[in-house]
Image (cartoon, rainbow, N blue to C red):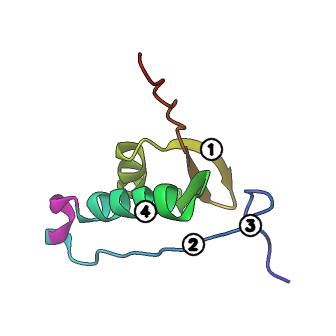
Amino acid sequence: MPEQLPVGKLEQAELVLYCLEADEMWSYSLATEAAKKMITYDFEQVGFSNIVSAADILNTASFKVMERLGMHDWKTKDFIDYYKLERQIQPKTLVGS
């Protein structure tokens, strides 16, 4: 049986893997822009309460992407660093205020 991710019990999960192989593609923020859209969709449409991202501990470029997205370093296990972003609940506007 495969080892579980260190995120506890998950009711729903989405796994997205990406690789930008060509060095000349790295400076266009493609990963950041794609991840922004996925995060918005997952929070607003799917209803996730948090999102966890992971990268090899030597992959500093991926850490920069995760930090630009507002994620924070959560935990490290088996040479993988996990970042987490929790959904921010917006207070409802009171009528007449």
Label 3 or label 4, whichever comes before in sequence order: 3
Q: Which residues are magenta?
A: 25-29
Q: Amino acid at mark 2?
A: Glu
Place of residue 59 in the rendered image (x, y in percent of width and height, measured from the top left): 43, 59
Q: Is residue 51 above or below residue 95?
A: below
Query: In percent of the image, x 80 and y 80: which residue is there?
Result: 2
Mark 2 Cα-neighbour bin, 10 Å: few <14, some 14–19, many ≥20: few
The extreme front residue here reads: 96
Place of residue 47 in the rendered image (x, y in percent of width and height, measured from the top left): 57, 58
Residue picked out by circle 4: 41
Q: CA distance from mark 3 to mark 1?
A: 20 Å
Query: In percent of the image, x 62 and y 60: which residue is there?
Result: 79
Instruction: Please report contact status of discs 1 and 2: CB closer than 8 Å, yes or no.
Output: no
Label 3 or label 1, whichever comes before in sequence order: 3
Label 1 or label 4, whichever comes before in sequence order: 4
The quadrant in which the N terminus is found is bottom right
Q: Nearer the viewer, mark 3 or mark 2?
A: 3
Identify the image quadrant of residue 93: top left
Residue picked out by circle 3: 11
Q: CA distance from mark 3 to mark 4?
A: 17 Å
Query: In percent of the image, x 16 and y 59: which residue is there?
Result: 27
Residue picked out by circle 2: 14
- Count up the numbered dots: 4
Q: CA distance from mark 4 to mark 2?
A: 12 Å
Mark 4 Cα-neighbour bin, 10 Å: few <14, some 14–19, many ≥20: few
Element type at marker 3?
loop
